[in-house]
Amino acid sequence: MTAVHSERNGGAVQAVFFDAGFTLIFPSRPVIDCYLETARAVSHEHCDTKLREAFNRAWAAGTRSDPGDHRSSDALERERWHRFTLKIAQEIPELLPHHKAWLERLEGAFDTGDGWRLVSSAPPLLRDLRARGLKVAIVSNWHAGLHRIVSSVGLADLVDFVVCSADVGFRKPHPEIFQVALRQGSVPPSAVVHVGDTWDEDVVGAEAVGITPIHILGGPSTTRNPTTRHRTIADLSEIAGLV
């Protein structure tokens, strides 16, 4: 497989940026299972089928009410989660009165390292990249809890820095979050690749600032535009052969 830099950059890759969720870390258990179990804990009425159907519709529609709004902060990211879960609960009369308690349980499940698992191929890959002299960073859309999660799953010692949208004020695909990462890494965009699972955020966003995107297929968003220059991979372990 041809290395990224020989085809696109005309020089060696100096840094690799990674998305966090569904790239380096995954939920410890299926997301829908957690949504169902936390709902059962706050509502005595059986609503599994309704919740599963409502969740699938909401997930397919996207987690943001306004896809063009790229602002970010801890409060904004948590408000988006509030709106997403409320949208689901509004379709389920048995759950709606318990929405607040349900969301609190979901936050408890996903706000700590216990709610996430590190991809098994990530540690050796990240160590190898850094041993080769490359800078390695996480660039992710997340609330401020990302730093706690990164530390809990053992990623903090495997990357050089973490750029979180809630800290920057903008989320991918907005160019500012990528620019902050470039400044922090002291690297030009032409010498960087960005790896992620989401098309608009990780592929389109990275390419817009001159970063080479590598798209991991199989995540929550796998839409492809064949006119856009990018790499696609099926597994994180393929990165080592591309840079």
Image (cartoon, grey):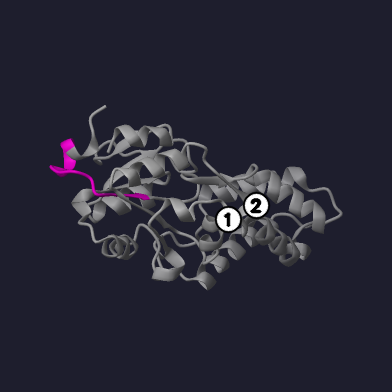
Residue 57 in picture, x, y percent from top left: 59, 47
Residue shown at the point (62%, 60%) measured from the top left: 111
Q: Identity of the amino acid at label 1?
A: Ser
How crowded is the residue under tag 1: few (<14 C-alpha within 10 Å), some, or many (20+)?
some
Q: Identity of the amino acid at label 2?
A: Asp
Q: Is residue 113 visible?
A: yes
Segment colored magenta: 6-17
- Number of dots carrying numbers: 2
Residue shown at the point (30%, 64%) measured from the top left: 184
Quadrant housing residue 86: bottom right
Q: Is residue 180 above or below residue 235?
A: below
Per the image, the residue denoted by label 2 is: 114
Residue 113 in picture, x, y percent from top left: 61, 54
Residue 190 in picture, x, y percent from top left: 19, 50
How crowded is the residue under tag 2: few (<14 C-alpha within 10 Å), some, or many (20+)?
some
Residue 132 in picture, x, y percent from top left: 29, 43
Residue shown at the point (44%, 39%) measured from the top left: 124
Q: Are marks 1 and 2 in contact (CB under 8 Å)?
A: yes
- Counting residues from the start of the chain, the first of labels 1 and 2 encountered is 2
Per the image, the residue denoted by label 1 is: 152
Label 2's element?
helix
